């Protein structure tokens, strides 16, 4: 059973991520570090209100995954300096604290065009963040590079709305190598991040482009099927060594019929079976 920390939970992808984490049976604890309260509530969810400028090591507990969805725009931030604080300084500081706490896996959203040498300022900052995180030497770093995110935002962003409509019209033409330019639903990115957290590449640094994120889903787990004869084959569950009189040990066999799981505990008493409910 796993625990997760999420920063940037009030954004488009982050808000979907915490809901999906809370509904996922693999996770028993979801901790959000936020600058304000959330409307979403869940028994698994704990929200810590913190000032990101004064975060300390004690604010980042151990968790199996740290999901970083922090991001803003220059218009909303008010200046390039304020933008870099949210999109570069905060994620890097949080990653450093997570490393000290031994968190084994950090997943961070950057951008499809992240590149330190890009002629676009936004992509340069994202590229600089990726480089700094790689240099930090985390145990495991997964870099999420979505294309234009679409979904229901609390705020109106004219540029993104215009881009969303343009890409929607151009979608039939975006085939082959151009498929990577297609917009992607924020809910799908959130799901892909959980899939990566649970089943992703086990390597120090992995980069996931948007076209890969769009196809990700939880793997189908094959369920073992038992016939009635196999389920109540006591001799099979005991093992061949138990049938040998010379090596026979006293055992109490406990059958969990709900999960078809057999557990054996050695005890100092004779074997007895409760046949009261047998048919």
Image (tube, grey):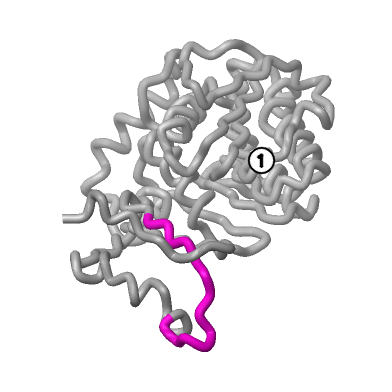
Q: Is residue 65 left or right of residue 58?
A: left
Residue 88: in sight, yes or no? Answer: yes
Is 97 located above or below residue 249 in the figure? above
- The stretch in magenta equals 243-255
Q: Is residue 17 left or right of residue 128?
A: left
| Residue found at x 29% / y 60% | 223
State which quarter of the image contains the C terminus: bottom left
Which residue is nearer to you in this view: 83 or 166?
83
| Residue found at x 54% / y 42% | 111
Q: Quadrant of residue 20?
A: top left
Disc 1 designates what residue?
63
Q: Quadrant of residue 219?
A: bottom left
Is 69 located above or below residue 143 in the figure? above
Name the spot of residue 221 as percent of width and height, x first: 33, 59
Residue 251 on the magenta span: yes
Outermost residue to the left = 279
């Amino acid at each position: 059973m796993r625990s997760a920390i999420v920063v940037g939970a009030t954004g488009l992808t982050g808000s979907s991520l915490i809901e999906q984490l809370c509904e996922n049976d693999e996770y028993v604890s979801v901790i959000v570090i936020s600058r304000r309260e959330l409307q979403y509530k869940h028994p698994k969810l704990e929200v810590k209100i913190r000032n990101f400028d004064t975060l300390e090591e004690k604010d980042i507990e151990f968790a199996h995954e740290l999901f970083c969805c922090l991001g803003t725009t220059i218009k909303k931030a008010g200046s390039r300096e304020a933008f870099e604080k949210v999109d570069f300084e905060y994620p890097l500081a949080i990653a450093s604290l997570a490393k000290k706490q031994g968190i084994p896996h950090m997943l961070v959203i950057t951008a499809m065009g992240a590149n330190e040498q890009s002629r676009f300022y936004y992509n340069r900052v994202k590229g600089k963040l990726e480089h700094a995180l790689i240099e930090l030497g985390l145990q495991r770093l997964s870099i999420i590079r979505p294309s234009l995110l679409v979904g229901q935002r609390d705020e109106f962003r004219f540029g993104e709305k215009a881009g969303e409509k343009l890409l929607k019209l151009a979608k039939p033409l975006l085939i082959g190598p151009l498929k990577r330019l297609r917009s992607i639903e924020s809910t799908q990115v959130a799901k892909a991040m959980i899939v990566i957290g649970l089943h992703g590449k086990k390597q120090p640094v992995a980069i996931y482009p948007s076209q890969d994120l769009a196809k990700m889903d939880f793997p189908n787990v094959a369920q073992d099927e038992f016939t009635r004869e196999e389920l109540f084959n006591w001799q099979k569950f005991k093992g061949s060594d138990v049938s040998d009189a010379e090596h026979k040990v006293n055992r109490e066999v406990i059958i969990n019929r709900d999960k078809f799981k057999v557990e054996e505990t050695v005890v100092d008493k004779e074997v007895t079976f409760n046949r009261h409910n047998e048919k």
